[in-house]
Image (cartoon, coloured by chain):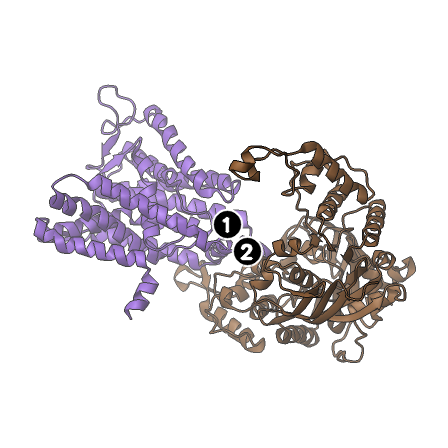
Amino acid sequence: MLKKFIATAGWPRVIIGLFLLALFVTAPFVGVRISTSLSDTLVRFGMNGVMVLAMIPMVQAGCGLNFGLPLGVIAGLLGATMSIEFGVRGALGFATAIGLSIPIAAILGYGYGQLLNRVKGDEMMIATYVGFSSVAFMCMAWLLLPYKNPTMVWGYQGTGLRTTISVDNYWSHILSDFLSFKIGTFYFPTGMFLFFAAMCFLIWLFMKTKTGTAMTAVGSNPEFARAGGVNVDRMRVISVVLSTIFGAIGILVYEQSFGFIQLYMGPFYMALPTVAAILLGGASVNRATIFNVVVGTFLFQGILTMTPSVINSVLKTDMSEVIRIIVSNGMILYALTRKAQVKR
Amino acid sequence: MPEVPLLKLENIGKEYFGNRVLADVSFSLNRGEILGLVGENGAGKSTLMNILFGMPVISGTGGYEGNIVLDGEVIRFGSPFDALAAGIGMVHQEFSLIPGFSAAENILLNREELNKSLLETVFSERLNTLDRPGMRARAARAIKTLGVDIGVDTIAAEMPVGYKQFIEIAREIDRTRTRVLVLDEPTAVLTETEARILLDALRKLADGGIAIIFISHRLQEIKSLCDRILVLRDGNVIRDSDARSASIRDIAAWMVGRNVEEDRPVRAGTISDEVALSVRDLWVDMPGETVRNAAFDVHKGEIFGIGGLAGQGKLGIPNGIMGLYPAGGTVSLFGREVELNKPRKALDRGMAFVSEDRRGVGLLLGERIDWNITFTGMQVQNRFLKGLPLLGNLVRLRDDDAIAAESEQYIKSLEIRCTGPAQRAVELSGGNQQKVCLAKAFSMRPELLLICEPTRGIDVGAKELVLNTLRRYNEEYGTTILITSSELEELRSVCDRVAIVGEGKIAGILPAISPAERFGLLMMGDVEDEGAQKEAVTGNA
């Protein structure tokens, strides 16, 4: 029984799961409240879930992990800032942000997909630089775009967007607080979870369609797919467009929970944690499931939430950032070396 | 002639993973004798030479049976180095020259002439400098033995292919101990003049006492050069004959086998006069299997075979028709032209394809068997899908039940040994994988079935089953089938007519019941005369 469980879950997940459990067990003894820790973990899980989900289409189509996620994030940020610029508040504002970012993400994703089709075999390397350079480009754009809303622009100058923009009066916690409840200090963001579940369902549905099946085949063996009459390049572009759109929606979910829009270098730091999460969940470079997303995001965000509070209390020093870096980069390193076994 | 033969092979046998490739092969070789080794692709020539040369692939797969006796002594080489030390030299089909080195450096690689130096006493001769003039002289001598004129300072990368072949041989000659020289198709890349020079050189070497094993597909060369001829077929020695007494026609017949009329089942299917597939001026740019100009007609309900030696372009024909490799020319199915270079167009027109590259193109190794079988049907014919009632049937999802049901049916009828439709294709044996590929093609319910190498890499039992399945499918549904295979015997047993491809062209088309040597001659590059060919193309033969 136990052996079978370990075999299906995989050793890394068992070890990290046990580690996370140990952190939760230790927490009360070092003065960390378990209920807040748990709700922190759940909130962060909900915040990041959709962005991790965005990895699935590209991985399944054989385009590798979407290190170019910042591109989708930028589309989301454009949608968010535009909805605020137009002054739409509440649920409608959030819907506007999503509605505006999807076409932007689709256009950016199409170009990004065309680029990746020209560099088959090196997708992840190129994707990383697409992410980097798009962030750098937008650093200029944020300053130059003609935004006017006073909540967003630099106060003393009247032009250029600020690095951090509050969404408090617009759509802060619009999903999180929907049907949410509190038991003591434990807070559960029901709405955000429902939204994440809906997104998972959409991906699941898509992967079951004819196109989704063809996409999986392209990722599994492009030559087979081609001989089966599938346009391989088109499938890859569709997967990249989907990944980018989900990245855009993902950052909006993140922002409404966080309460702030982070511009400039903000998107820069989004790709690595999401990649690490899905790999931690047991996905490989060319196969990922929704199960991988859920497990991986929970474990990764759990570790990120718990290690700082618990270990800092134990060691009485601030090690949180160091541990965070070791865990997230260590996981990426581990998963990318596994690639050699997966490939024939 | 000395009493004791220089090299003697006694009852050599070899199995690869339960697949017998050599059985009871015995022959002997005297000093100064040239033995011609002929056989179709896969007859066991390469395996035999690998055993002789002590290649690791042999010991890595369980060794071999029987004995090799060199100069009265039983030998068993652990590695090619042992074979070299014992005086067996081998020239491979692939060039193993270092492109940036000169002819002399390549010939004397690792056997260089050295200058004496003090450092040698302290360390080893590894620190000695090279004696360049000495090396040049030695290399020049080796090249001269071959009777060609190649500058010893020429860089290997800048030589024409023919020269490279000579350098390879010169390298083996330079080894003073070389007593047996094995040449694996040395003339394949040479022009006629170069080949003649080479043959003369080999004759000279043999006169000097070196025994030579010469492997070639060009029977004319074998006949003119060799003293004796050994014919291999399916791992058995078919004939060990004097070269002078055997005619080329005889050799060809021995190679491809006996006539098969006797055990040929009576055909139940009917062939109509209607032309199903018509190919004209077809060229296909498939690496290693280039098709230059192919033309033939296949009738409705016919099983048409395409044979020929490896690399002549037979595989390029079906791959080109299916649009998998860049191609040009005219291909029509039932009178309507098929667009080339787009696999989808060919599939839409009711063609189904079984690739020779089973693992690379034919299967989704990491996915379930039922996905493998139904994928093309789903993508091309929109089958195995069900509408989602909630969304007004706009979104259509995979119908996993229908997929499993279809696959169950083929698993049963083709006797695919597996744990069920959910098993991953990679876990199946070669024969069962091939059946999955066939099921994928059958599931398309094609008008025309193109099958490449249906029995490659599968055991004898599975071979029979696969061929019978094809025959049955043809009889039951009247499907036109185009089979491409390296095994002529197989084509002759299943097909109605067989085309032999040589140098990217159809060398000739014969009814399958034609005598074996006529096929053999076609394979050897003897093109049928114009009239007969025209007749064969249109199928009025």
Give the image quarter of residue B392. bottom left
Name the element at disc 1.
Answer: helix
Distance from label 2 to label 1 (Cα)?
10 Å
Label 2 or label 1, whichever comes before in sequence order:
2
- Residue at image position (52%, 68%) is B428
User: Quick check: B459 above or below B320?
Assistant: below
Q: Amino acid at mark 2?
A: Ala
Q: Chain of mark 2?
A: A
- Identify the residue under disc 1: A235
Q: How many marks?
A: 2
Q: Is residue A200 left or right of residue B426?
A: left
- Residue at image position (45%, 55%) is A342
Give the image quarter of residue B100. top right
Tag in front: 2 or 1:
2
- Identify the residue under disc 2: A225
Q: Chain of mark 1?
A: A
Discs 2 and 1 lie in a common subunit: yes
The residue lying toward the viewer, choosing from B6 and A172, is: B6
Name the element at disc 2.
Answer: helix
User: Quick check: A181 above or below A88?
Assistant: below
In the rendered image, the quadrant that contains the N terminus of chain A is bottom left
Chain purple in the figure, letter? A
Crowd around label 1: few <14 · some 14–19 · many ≥20 (10 Å): many
Q: Position of residue A260 (x, y in %)?
A: 23, 37
The residue lying toward the viewer, choosing from B238 and A187, is: B238
Q: Position of residue A146 (x, y in %)?
A: 33, 25
Q: Amino acid at mark 1?
A: Met
- In the displayed orientation, state which residue is furthest to the top: A157
> Marks 1 and 2: in contact by CB < 8 Å?
yes
User: What is the drawing colour of chain B?
Assistant: brown
- Residue at image position (51%, 44%) is A120
